[in-house]
Image: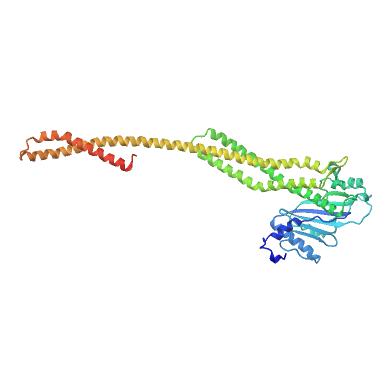
Amino acid sequence: MSLTLLPSQHPQRVRLHNEIHARPAEEMQAPLAITHVVMLTDAAQREASRAHVAQLLRNHHRPQPDATTTHVLIDLGAFHLRWELHTEFVCWTFSKAMAPAAMDDVREPATAVDHVPHDWLAALPGQCLSSLHLWALRETAVDADHLVRHMLQEETLVGAGVAGGGGKVYTDFAIHADGFSRMLLLSGESLSPKRLGRLVQRLLEIETYRMAALLGLPAARQAAAVLASAERELAELAQAIRSANRDSEPALLDRLTRLAGQVESEYAATHSRFSASTAYFELVDKRIQDIQESRLDGFQSIREFMDRRLTPARSTCEWATRRQNALSERVSRVSSLLRTRVEIEQQQSSQELLGTMNQRQDMQLKLQSTVEGLSVAAITYYFTGLISYLAKGAKTLGWPWSPESTAAVAIPVVALGVWWSLRRLHHRLFAAHGPH
């Protein structure tokens, strides 16, 4: 079907599809010298690395990489270059075919970087995280014992059969005087160029990911000191909360809030590093599995070496992560406890305030009742006085009672009427607005 007849395409379809083919293993033929350099870089240095490889290609009159290139694989004649751009680092792999020759008296074969421009190599952007010389030699063409004895340190020597018995690998995981580690791969007759290429790539990745994983170790050690201080302060705060009074609680809550901010800040600063280390450790395990190790008599295998030497660092990073999470949860629990205590005391204060207001209201009602009694008396006195004056005027018109008698008779009637009127007024107010 023609591409024009296909439906609308996702803009990243081709790039995502080709991701499965990214960084393919090369076909390699022993004898071969390989130098692998890993440069730890930030965003600006990764862009500078692309410009640096472009400079090398320009000097050799080769096509330039574009702005999205993350992988370059090219033969420059004097040496072969493999350039890989990763999230945190850049890998530079130089390889050079070696002429078959007897190496019985050779202490160490020539390296691939002997043919790389030294000034250009010294100017690689970033900081060197790992550098390794690897030689892939035919097992039948060399004296393995001679080379291992002169190239590698016996104290940390590691050796294993690889590729299902198709080859042998030796290394000492040590940085030698020139700043490079060393690894010797002896290829058997059954190891095809494709399998040799995949094996070399896996061995280089083991060293690369091992060092990248260990970047979390300094962060874990630094975090341990911060966490220890925070845990002591949290313990002091928890003890202070037990004996705190209402006046000291706001200050304790402020200290606890600041501690929570410090813990979360440390977590945010190290979480990505610890997560990356966990992923790199898993990649190391996977690559060791991929090389299909088998034991060589008298040698410690790569997996055994990694289990013994890498597990403590791995556990330290994992422990720091768990400790951060546990401390964060403890701070959260203590904060919730203190806030609950403050809220309960505020509720108690509110209840006491309401009780005081009720007492005042009762007093106001009593005072109001007293005032109402006085009001009834005053109103009764006022109306009785008016009735007395009316009786005096009515006396001349034939009223039979004296003003005093008339006032005396009117007093209870007037008082009862005033009292009854005030009660009705209260009932109306309560019916309209409800009790307060």
Q: Position of residue 189 (x, y in %)?
A: 90, 50
Q: Position of residue 150 (x, y in %)?
A: 89, 47
Camera-side residue of 216 and 251 = 216
On screen, residue 252 versus residue 31, left or right, reads left
Could you say where residue 110 lies in the image, as x and y percent from the top left? Answer: 88, 54
Q: Quadrant of residue 315?
A: top right
> Which of the two residues, 178 or 390, is positioned nearer the viewer here?
390
Apparent side of residue 384 relative to residue 108 in the rendered image (left or right): left
Return the residue nearer the eye: 46 or 6: 6
Q: Is residue 345 left or right of residue 428?
A: right
Q: Residue at x 69, y 66 (%)?
A: 4
Q: Is 416 on the left or on the right of 47, as rendered?
A: left
Name the residue at 29% across, 42% down: 429
Residue at the front extreme, as displayed: 1
Residue 159 higher or lower than 366, as above or below: below
> Does residue 248 appear in this view?
no
On the rendered image, what quadrant is the N terminus found in?
A: bottom right
The answer to whether one can see residue 428 in this image is yes
Say above or below: 406 vs 203. Answer: above
The quadrant of the image that shows the C terminus is: top left
- Up the image or down, 413 lies above or below 175; here it is above
